[in-house]
């Protein structure tokens, strides 16, 4: 399977912002709008956890730890999903993964929040 491709990670100071992007592979272009998309993250020594999910009708859910700070969105015409992260905290440091329909994963993008 060709993976999803994440981008936009990096090093940011506490209180800063980042916007992650996830591009779907061509193989799922025709079904992308019918897929539930999500962002997960995994910190060192921790289990992978759901950060945010956006359904086909654009309803969203968020982990309690990011509610009010992160926003997930999708652009079906561009076959992309985004995660806008504001007011970042050191505990947000992790590798962030994009997921499609609980089936496809990306390679991950590192987000480090540190002064």
Image: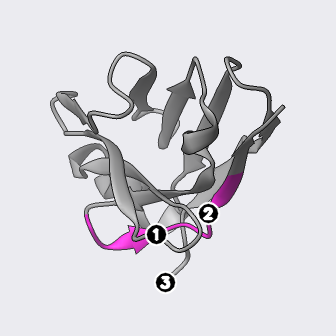
Which residue in the structure is indicated by mark 2? 108
> Which of the two discs, 2 and 3, sits closer to the camera?
2
Asked whether disc 1 touches disc 2, contact meaning CB atoms under 8 Å apart, the reply is: no
Q: Is residue 114 left or right of residue 104?
A: right
Q: Earlier in the sequence, mark 1 or mark 2?
A: 1
Separation of residues labelled 3 and 1 (CA atoms): 26 Å
Residue 76, by quadrant, is top left
Separation of residues labelled 2 and 3 (CA atoms): 15 Å
Separation of residues labelled 1 and 2 (CA atoms): 15 Å
Disc 3, SS: loop
- Image coordinates of residue 54 in percent, x first then y, are 27, 37
| Vertical comparison of 46 with 67: above or below | below
Q: Which disc is residue 46 wearing?
A: 1
Q: Is residue 54 left or right of residue 42?
A: left
Read off the magenta span: 102-110
**Residue depicted at x 55% and y 62%:** 43
**Residue depicted at x 50% and y 41%:** 80
What quarter of the picture does the C terminus occupy? top right
**Residue depicted at x 39% and y 60%:** 99
Q: Earlier in the sequence, mark 2 or mark 3?
A: 3
- Image coordinates of residue 3 in percent, x first then y, are 55, 72
Q: Earlier in the sequence, mark 3 or mark 1?
A: 3
Q: Nearer the viewer, residue 63 or 82?
A: 63
Q: Nearer the viewer, residue 32 or 51?
A: 51
Residue 109 sits inside the magenta stretch:
yes
Q: Nearer the viewer, residue 76 or 52?
A: 52
Badge 3 crowding class, 10 Å Cα cut-off, few under 14, some 14 to 19, many 20 or more, is: few
Disc 1, SS: loop
Q: Nearer the viewer, residue 27 or 60?
A: 60
Which residue in the structure is indicated by mark 3? 1
**Residue depicted at x 40% and y 30%:** 72
């Amino acid at each position: 399977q060709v993976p999803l491709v994440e981008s936009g990670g990096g090093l940011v100071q506490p209180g800063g912002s980042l916007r992650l992007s996830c591009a779907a592979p061509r193989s799922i272009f025709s079904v992308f709008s019918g897929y539930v998309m999500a962002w997960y993250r995994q910190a060192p020594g921790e289990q992978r956890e759901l950060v945010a999910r956006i359904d086909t009708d654009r309803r969203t859910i968020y982990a309690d730890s990011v509610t009010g700070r992160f926003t997930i969105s999708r652009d079906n015409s561009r076959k992309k999903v985004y995660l806008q992260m504001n007011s970042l905290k050191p505990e947000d440091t992790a590798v962030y993964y994009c997921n499609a329909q609980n089936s496809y994963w990306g390679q991950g993008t590192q987000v480090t929040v540190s002064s």
